[in-house]
Image (cartoon, rainbow, N blue to C red):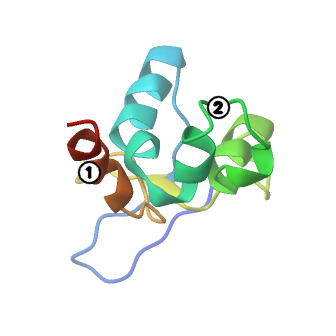
Amino acid sequence: MIQHRCDDHQPVSRPYQPSNGSEGEGFHAAFCDHCARDAAFRDTGYEGDPALGCQILADSFCYSVTDPKYPKEWITDDERGPRCTAWTPDTSAALAPEQDK
């Protein structure tokens, strides 16, 4: 298992993989549903070209957490918990409700 330590004050991080579907759904809702990296695919109603989607998310489904190709961006530690280090806020999603008015 890969572990990273920046200095003595930083918690040790390790690869994160949801342990079940419910946990994965919660992670997806907290990060992927609001991330600019997957916005173009979400905008198609998940019916468009998969290449529009987030490759990190796709790889999380394709590879085991022990595979070298598993996303290194998905990490967890005892202090901050699971997160995606590549998460980028989707600012266009924040505008969508206003556009409906």
Count of numbered circles on the image? 2
Instruction: Give the residue displayed 38% in from the left and 33% down from the top.
Output: 29
Q: What x and y, as percent, mark residue 53?
A: 67, 49
Residue 4 image point, x, y percent: 48, 71
What residue appears at the point 78 percent right and 41 percent down from the top-left corner?
A: 63
Amino acid at circle 1: Ala
> Which residue is denoted by mark 1 in the rendering?
94
Task: Work out which quarter of the rendered image holds the N terminus and state it.
Answer: bottom right
Tell me how far mark 2 sits from mark 1, CA to CA. Answer: 19 Å
x, y (%) of residue 15? 55, 52
Is 72 on the left or on the right of 8, as rendered? Answer: right
Residue 90 seen in the current view: no
Residue sitting at 28 percent across and 45 percent down?
A: 99
Seen in the image, is 92 located left or right of residue 4?
left
Please report contact status of discs 2 and 1: CB closer than 8 Å, yes or no: no
Q: Is residue 85 placed above or below 16 in the rendered structure? A: below
- Residue 22 or 46: which is nearer the viewer? 46
Secondary element at image label 2: loop
Instruction: Please state which amino acid type lies under the numbered disc 2.
Output: Tyr
User: Which residue is denoted by mark 2 in the rendering?
Assistant: 46
Which residue occupies 71% across, 30% down? 47
